[in-house]
Image: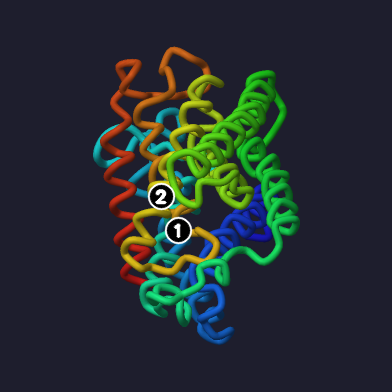
Amino acid sequence: FGDNLQQLRRWFFQGAFCDTSASIVSGGVAERMTFFGYVVHTVIMTAFIYPVCVYWAWSGSGWLNYSEDGGVKYKSTIGPAYQDWAGSGVIHLVGGVAALCGAIVVGPRKGRFTEDAKQEDFLPHSVPFTVLGTFILWLGWYGFNPGCVAGLHTDMQAYTAANALVNTTLAPCAGGLVAWLLRRYVFAPYVFDVPALCNGVLAGLVAVTAGSGFVKHWEALIIGALAGVFYCLSVKLLTKLQIDDPIDAVSVHFTNGLWGTIAIGFFGNPKEPFGGNGVFYGGDQLGVQVVACICFIVWSAVWS
């Protein structure tokens, strides 16, 4: 691939995406998995799980997105081509499934769900570091989402990158605020929970990643707001099932990677220049998005 300069750019960009899918797992198994075990799973994730999913979806030759006319029009074997602008499904859903499997296999931390457990012992130890980490991740998203334009040679590429930038700002704001308010007025501990706000921001970012280049700004707000709701519901469900997810990686990445990928089936106007195909506008995108999610979940879960 060294003879193709375009491949060098793609290799570095996809390397960063691949690393992200592996790092998601660390949150679900934090404090319980050995370093050697994590290294082994990282090799499996980066060598087998992620590459296959990205080939299906983004290579231009996989069953979810391929062309028979030299790249003029793309399709899948079951209808329109799968859409996932920057990886809600390919990266976050795939990594989130692996994190969920890891959390189930290694079990909860000692005392996490016992009757006499002091739940304050399991709260984040540093809220300032939590906020700092959230802002660092958010800043990185400004590279990932607009960067998927892969060039700024035309006016349309610049407009698409700008659309992705704005959506990458609006959705996390909506997700963070919704999660923050829900934890204050609807879900325990009924306080203004800053870590929940931070995870709501990340949930909004994960959810809008699939459609950041396709959807309108008001659609990004809806996607982000619902991401905050789904995050809170997911945390509640995992706690009920006694699945220990120390930093809510599963609720952020699996739950909202799934939501963000399916959301593209609803939003995005085919008449707009950005390339959406949502059912709300008469499109037929939803089916392939759902099927792709099922396949990503099964593939990642089996190998994990």
Mark 2: amino acid:
Thr
Which part of the image, by quadrant, shows the C terminus?
A: bottom left
Q: Secondary structure at mark 1?
A: helix
Residue at figure coordinates x 35%, y 68% from the top left:
242
Residue at figure coordinates x 40%, y 61% from the top left:
97
Find disc 1 in the rendering and name its residue.
250
How far across and how far down the image is residue 180, in percent?
56, 40
Would residue 184 be visible to someone looking at this image?
yes
Mark 2 Cα-neighbour bin, 10 Å: few <14, some 14–19, many ≥20: many
Task: Please determine whether, in this image, residue 149 is positioned above or below residue 36.
Answer: above
Question: Would residue 146 appear left or right of 79 to someone viewing this image?
Answer: right
**Mark 1–mark 2 CB contact (< 8 Å):** yes
Task: Please determine whether, in this image, residue 278 is positioned above or below residue 65.
Answer: above
Which of these two is toward me, 77 or 189?
Answer: 189
Quadrant in the rendering for residue 125: bottom right
Labels 1 and 2: the sequence-earlier one: 1
Which of these two is toward me, 257 or 103?
Answer: 103
Find disc 2 in the rendering and name its residue.
255
Question: Would residue 91 appear left or right of 5 to someone viewing this image?
Answer: left
Mark 1 Cα-neighbour bin, 10 Å: few <14, some 14–19, many ≥20: many
| Residue occupying the far top of the picture | 271
Mark 1: amino acid:
Val
